[in-house]
Image (cartoon, rainbow, N blue to C red):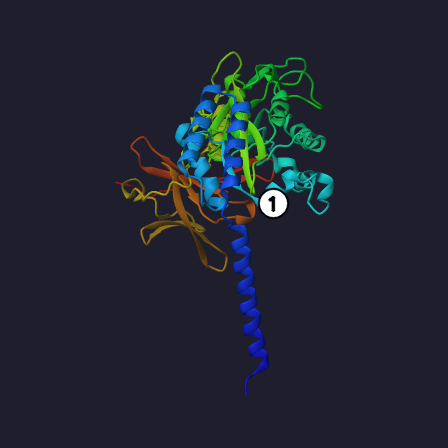
Amino acid sequence: MTNPEIKKGKGLTLFCVLMLANTWLLSAQTVTKQYVDTIVHRLSDQLEAHYPFPEISARYKQKLLARLQEGAYHNLLEEQLAKQLTTDLNAVHKDRHLNIIRDSLAYRAAITPASASPDKQPPEELAYEGNYGFDKVEIDHFLSTAYISVPGPWHAVPEAFAAATAAMNLATGSKHIIIDIRRNGGGSGAMGRYLASYFYATGNDQYYLYGFHKDKSQDEQEWTLPFVPGKTAPDAKLYILTGRNTGSAAEGFAFAMQRLKRGVVIGDTTAGAGIAGSYVPLQCNLMLFLPVKMIVAPHTIKGWEGDGVIPDTATGKQDAWLRTRKIIIQDLLKNEKDEERKEMLTWRLEDFLIGDTRPIDWARYNRLPFQYSEKISIRKKDGLLWYGITEKNKTTNYYQMQEIKPDVLLIKDLLPELGANAARLYINRDTRGNIVAITRKTYLRQENNKIVTGSSLSRSTKQP
């Protein structure tokens, strides 16, 4: 006897497969010759009318019409046509912004009046959910450093500027300010100018960038603002973190501040998207991102299009944030007069060496294992050095040691409640290089950045 439930399930599965197939067919329509002609001519006309470089737009148009005459765009699906058009444009001149995509939702939204799309989530709601491009602000009071994470995108709405103001008001009390735009793909250039304004005194507005259009009457000088809410930071050192995903308006911020010699760019070369633009609907779900404004440094024709922003300090695979902290600590150490602060800064600088694991130099440390007191001992086991603490019940707990630099060793996992890397061993030697004593130091980061130095324990047995 046939199980009716199983039969019903098979029928439902077949129905779902057919529905999926039909959905795919609907999304993979071949573009008719009539629509192909419309798309190519509309694309050519838009480039000719608005692309900021007339000689390049003329070559674009010539290429597109020649390929249309050859029949290169006929009998293609929408997605295939979008890719082929982009490929042909790039063959003439590679513009990282200029491209054609197939996006049915974006196309319908572009050709539908806003009042006719009540169910669509407004852009301002999406911006709100992303906190208008601002992620977090972290303050390190000891280093007088503020870190602002701005993954973007940037928006030019009052709420976005309020978010920027809040972030900057937290940061401007610090002597070093880090703005992280490594994942920021761009958005509104107005936000970059707004942030830049905080790094100049009130009334000292700067010629920031210059944008030129195909229609020269629309060219514009971009200046920082003479006034921004809250406190400014004209004397703070600015570090801008960049990466391969830093694009468009975010690149503009890094480029302008670097050219103005107001900020140091650290990280990787940026995307190289230096022409601003917007999306234009073509036909058949195809959307053109049309670059309309080339952005360059004032009084020059030099921008970052194609080349990207080259960092002042390239970090390669090293984390740009960690590299910047190291630069800041080294900078502070140069001018620090207080010995206690010097010791704490040196400790933090040595933190960067911890990840560099290296084999133990036994020629140097062969005489380090020893019973230094009833409670403290160091032993060698399995090719490693271990720091031992003997408790009252005669049980000895051992902690692995790792060289940070010659005669400074990390005692791993000792006092974890004080944070990572809280305990270190310092070795004292005589003029002949023999070990004469050891000293353990503990960094109480959570208690006013205080380093506690333990008793010096001598190695009394004579060494050869």
Side of 138 where 231 appears, left or right? right
Question: Residue 88, position in %: x, y?
Answer: 42, 34
Looking at the image, which is closer to me, 415 or 157?
157
For image coordinates 51% across by 34% down, the residue present is: 182
Quadrant holding the N terminus? bottom right
Amino acid found under the numbered disc labelled 1 = Leu
- Quarter of the image for residue 13 reads bottom right
Looking at the image, which is closer to me, 448 or 125?
125
For image coordinates 50% across by 39% down, the residue present is: 36
- Quarter of the image for residue 107 reads top right
Question: Residue 167, position in %: x, y?
Answer: 65, 31
Looking at the image, which is closer to me, 187 or 114?
114
Q: Secondary structure at mark 1?
A: helix
Question: Residue 153, position in %: x, y?
Answer: 59, 35
Q: Is residue 373 above or below residue 87?
A: below
Circle 1 sits on which residue? 105
